Amino acid sequence: MEIVITDHPEQVVADIISAEIAAGATTLGLATGSSPVDTYKELVRRHKEEGLSFAGINAVMLDEYVGLPPDHPESYARFIREHFSDHVDIGEVYPPDGMAEDAQAAADAYDELIKEVGPVDVQILGIGSNGHIGFNEPSSSLSSRTRIKTLTAKTREDNARFFDSIDEVPRHVITQGLGTICDAKHAVLVATGEGKADAIAAAVEGPLSASCPGSILQWHPNATIVVDEAAASKLR
Ligand code: F6R
């Protein structure tokens, strides 16, 4: 596990992705939420101003809310289109189907799809204030595959800022499992701000444990944690 503490996490993550593409990456893994927004902005800038091309690259996503259609303003499929894929020359971006009648069958199918289009060369990750990656909430099996998860009250509170009220935050998601995430060849987690300091300390320096799902990255052979000073402030 490599830890990078920097004033410009988005530059470091964009540098990693650019280097992976230059080295022949063909599959990206995309996260949503606030943490990667500046990285997507920087990748779009490099595409428009510096000729960074995503031609020949496909992408899979980490997760999607159950019950939100892909054009819902808070669906993760729409987030990725608005922040990234509509602005670059990437091929397909495959979202999990949060509207499937049988959500678990859709989750199983998504895990298979990741195997087919993958392996993911570089997976972008954020981390929840409770240590989740993807939406693998604390106590998730370390070998889990893509499946339905119930969001904790803490995660629904954290994500209520994107909705008009907490009641509108979906209760369930389809998320890549920890085992699925760890199939990626390079996992790159970005976290900023004091609110992530406890989660980063637990993921990086705590025991490898399901109580902090992000700690699985200690076991991953190629994981990079990119944090600002505030998110790094509880590292010893
Ligand atoms: C989103 C995801 C989540 C977020 C995490 C942090 O696709 O998988 O793990 O990365 O909840 O969210 P933000 O960045 O909004 O603090």
Image (spheres, helix red, strand yellow):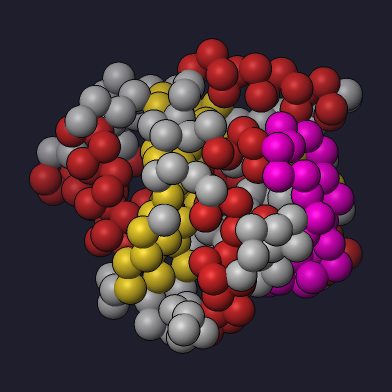
Instruction: Please name whichever residue, 95 or 145, is drawn nearer the observer in this view of the structure.
Output: 145
Q: Which x, y percent locates residue 141?
A: 77, 44
Write the start and end of the magenta stretch as one range. Answer: 138-162
* 80 up-or-down from 121: above or below: below
Q: Which x, y percent locates residue 144?
A: 73, 37
Q: Is residue 162 visible?
A: no
Image quadrant in which the N terminus is located: bottom left
Q: Report the side of 198 relative to 230 (left or right).
A: right
Q: Which x, y percent locates residue 168?
A: 83, 60
Q: Residue 144 lies in magenta, yes or no?
A: yes
**Quarter of image, res 130:** bottom right
Residue occupying the point 75% across, 62% down: 211
Residue occupying the point 74% across, 56% down: 210
Q: Is residue 117 visible?
A: yes
Q: Report the side of 21 relative to 179 (left or right).
A: left
Instruction: Please name whichever residue, 188 or 35, is drawn nearer the observer in this view of the structure.
Output: 188
Residue occupying the point 32% across, 67% down: 4
* 54 up-or-down from 208: above or below: above
